[in-house]
Image (cartoon, rainbow, N blue to C red):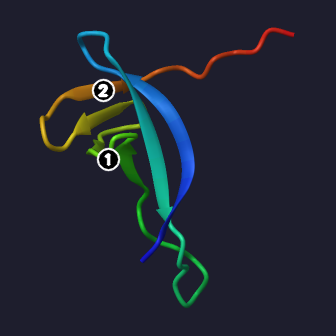
C-alpha cells in the first residue's frame, strides 16, 4: 500500500509550539475506484497523529493535543 501526500498544514500545541502536519491518502484505489480509507496524518518528522475533529489532532505517542492553524489570507 502506497500513500500520497495530499495536504499540509500547521498546528499548535498548548505551549505555542508549531508543528508541520502532513496528510496522506492511500494511492491504490479499490476495485470500484474509491479509496475508502481515512487519511493518515503525520508530523514532518514522522510521528503519527490522530484526527479528533476538523481543527483538533492528537499526537499518538505523547497524547499532546494540537489545534490546526487557520489558513493565511493573501492580501490583494
Q: Nearer the viewer, mark 2 or mark 1?
A: 1
**Can you give x and y, in whole percent of width and height, for residue 36 in the image?**
47, 72
Please tell me in which quadrant of the rendered image residue 11 appears: top left
Please tell me in which quadrant of the rendered image residue 15 appears: top left
* Front residue of this view, candidates 2 and 13: 2
- 41 with respect to 65 (left or right): right
**Can you give x and y, in whole percent of width and height, for residue 59 in the image?**
22, 38
Q: Which mark is residue 66?
A: 2
Q: CA distance from mark 2 to mark 1?
A: 15 Å
Where disc 1 sits, the SS reads: loop
* Front residue of this view, candidates 44 and 22: 44
Q: Residue at x 24, y 13 (%)?
A: 14
Looking at the image, is 74 positioned above or below residue 53?
above
Q: Residue at x 42, y 77 (%)?
A: 1
Q: Residue at x 87, y 10 (%)?
A: 76
- 38 with respect to 51 (left or right): right
Residue beneath label 1, please? Answer: 46
Looking at the image, is 61 positioned above or below residue 32?
above
Amino acid at each position: 500500500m502506497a500513500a500520497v501526500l495530499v495536504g499540509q498544514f500547521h498546528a499548535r500545541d498548548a505551549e505555542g509550539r508549531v508543528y508541520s502536519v502532513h496528510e496522506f491518502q492511500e494511492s491504490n484505489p479499490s476495485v470500484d475506484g474509491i479509496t475508502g480509507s481515512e487519511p493518515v496524518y503525520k508530523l514532518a518528522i514522522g510521528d503519527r497523529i490522530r484526527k479528533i475533529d476538523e481543527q483538533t489532532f492528537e499526537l499518538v505517542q505523547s497524547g499532546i493535543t494540537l489545534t490546526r492553524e487557520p489558513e493565511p489570507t493573501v492580501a490583494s
